[in-house]
Amino acid sequence: MSSNNSVMVFIQQDNGKVADVSIELLSKARDLADRLKATVTGTLIGDNIKGEAEKLFQYGADEIFTIEDKRLHDYTPVPYTKIMVDVIKKAKPQIVLYGATTTGRDIGPRIASTLKVGLTADCTSLEIGDYENKGVEYTDILYQIRPAFGGNIVATIVSPEKKPQMATVREGVMKVGDADPSRKGTVTPMTFDLSDADFPSVVIKKIKEEKLVDLKGSQIIVSGGMGVGSKENFALIKELAHVLGGEVGASRAAVDSGFISKDHQVGQTGTTVRPKLYIACGISGQIQHRAGMDESARIIAINSDNEAPIFQIAHYGIVGDLNDVIPKFIKAFKAKN
Amino acid sequence: MGLNLIVLVKQVPDTQNVTGEAMKEDGTVNRAVLPAIFNPDDLHALEAALEIKDANPGTTVSVITMGPPSAVQVLKDSLYRGADFVALISDRKFAGADTLATSYALKCAIEKIGKYDIVLCGRQAIDGDTAQVGPQTAEKLGINQISNVSNIESIDAKKGKIQARRSIEGGYEVVETSFPVLLTVTDEGYTPRPASVIKMMTYKNASAEMTENYDESYIDSSVERTADNAIALWDINAIGADVESCGLKGSPTKVKKIESVILKKEDITMVENTDDGISNMVHELIADHTLG
């Protein structure tokens, strides 16, 4: 262990491949570590994963701890928690970050409970700053910033007294910095004596359905909300997306109303996207939705209510009925080509 | 063969209807001004438990909630739907608890009940959306967990084994484990049953009574329950919780700052809803390579 002053990332692997969110978190960890004059470490648990560990230095990692065992191929909470707790106790990081995935949201709380430290879920921003409470000053504390209470407020949470400070962050929220292939680091293998009793869960099968909707990979997203009105009317949204070469998105309200399937959902409880162009049609712009798309390079809002909050983050606003506006849009685009 | 099931539920403010007056100056939420509802995921967890009970005669479903006295409403609702025993853990010393302090108090209450094969709770509550209390309670009990469960595929009560379908990104996995285990349940696989009119008649006047000592008759299904003995009220002493681990004192996370959401005002170009207006916008977007 080279350092007791690090920002650590739980490196999630699925079937031996490092998850995108872990790369995003390494980039963020690098920013935080530079501010704290600390190093960036990662813990990678799995089976036959050393090759993946080597790939992480280019994104900002200084040291990767690897723990390999055939029985660790699939994530299960008990052995993974046991290992992470041990690594954290030995490496004493100041901060530990987890992807807010079904894995990170399963292991993070379990580790926090074991170590009796704080954990803040689904942070949308992480910063370093000072904190004062009852006359006690704390310097260089992690500000864990997240929407709360159904997105109606943004809370800054701190856990100043206990280390490490821990947070989960959703995939797509943090940007991946430029990779630097010349960056070097250390892979530190660690061994654990694990008995069969450490593996109470067995993953019997794992089914990944082929993803038909690719929101994260799309540069153009045309999204519909409650204003679309019906499942049938979504055809217009799909047509515009098709004409522009984009993907179809939706607000949670539209998904909950059964207009379109959940894999199209953009927002805090759906997918976080940052395309070149986001067209919000009949979406009022609740914070939960905006949290998932407000980093888009260009936003067009189409809404019949000129008071809709979506206009406040849009670059172009069109007040009107989407059934009237979208055909004009399609016509104009076809005419330009 | 009957099982002992414990369901953890929460009364939550309906976060779809938050107004400015709902926020207190210290940044905490004034729940009194918001409509309080049964946390949606928890209703699905309760339904999962009741379906296990339907399939395994002799099973007992106990429901625990932590909250102010008014939270007794979700317990009555649980009785109306078919729960056998319910307990409210309520004490001023629990106030200000974060997920760690909450899970500690729940663990103490579960251990007071003592016998359990499966603990079920909703995946997350709509006021905090953290999904942390379930896994943290499992850890505090020293038991295994399966989170994000959309469906229980099979239960072998004799062998004490369960297979559950767990939702993961882009699909699902089926996990097998032995009792005792804690499950967090999503809103995907179960349809909560409505309240039974007969049970509503039985429990309509039920109120929480202070019970210092846990009474075995509570989980004895042969004991007839009436409005008088249905709801237990436990304070910090009744569940044997350490005050240092409860409420604000037992919470490592602190709220530094709360901001109402203020939208940042971008420079917006309002486009006329005309062929010319929209055509100009499309032209600009092509010119800056946003559209191809």
Image (tube, rainbow, N blue to C red):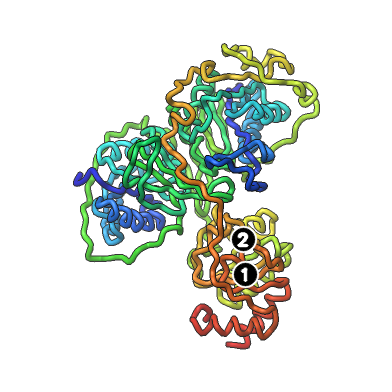
Residue with the most extreme front position: A135
Image coordinates of residue A112 in percent, x first then y, are: 40, 37
Q: Name the residue under label 1.
A: A301
Answer above or below: position of A93 versus A261: above
Q: Which of A64 and A318 is in front in this view?
A: A318
> Callout 2: few (<14), some (14-19), or many (20+) C-alpha neighbours within 10 Å?
many
Q: Can residue B268 be seen in this view?
A: yes
Could you say whether the residue bearing mark 2 is in a helix, strand or loop? Answer: loop
Subunit under mark 2:
A
The answer to which image quadrant residue A84 occupies is: top left
Subunit under mark 1:
A
Asked if residue B50 lies left or right of residue A69, the reply is: right
Q: Which amino acid does label 1 sit on?
A: Ala
Image coordinates of residue A303 in percent, x first then y, are: 68, 68
Label 1 near label 2: C-beta < 8 Å?
yes
In the rendered picture of this protein, how many numbered marks are placed on residues? 2
Could you tell me how far apart the alpha carbons at marks 2 and 1 are, in whole angstroms?
A: 9 Å
Which circle's residue, 2 or 1, is located before the other in the chain?
A: 2
Residue pictured at 77% horizontal, 21% vertical: B202
Image quarter hosting the N terminus of chain A: top left
Residue pictured at 56% horizontal, 66% vertical: A313
Image coordinates of residue A181 in percent, x first then y, are: 25, 65
Could you say whether the residue bearing mark 1 is in a helix, strand or loop? Answer: strand
Q: What residue type is labelled 2?
A: Gly
Residue pictured at 61% horizontal, 14% vertical: B211
Q: Which of B27 and A106 is in front in this view?
A: B27
Asked if residue A259 lies left or right of residue B29, the reply is: right
Q: Which of A313 and A208 is in front in this view?
A: A313
Q: Mark 2 points at which residue?
A: A285
Q: Is residue B55 visible?
A: no
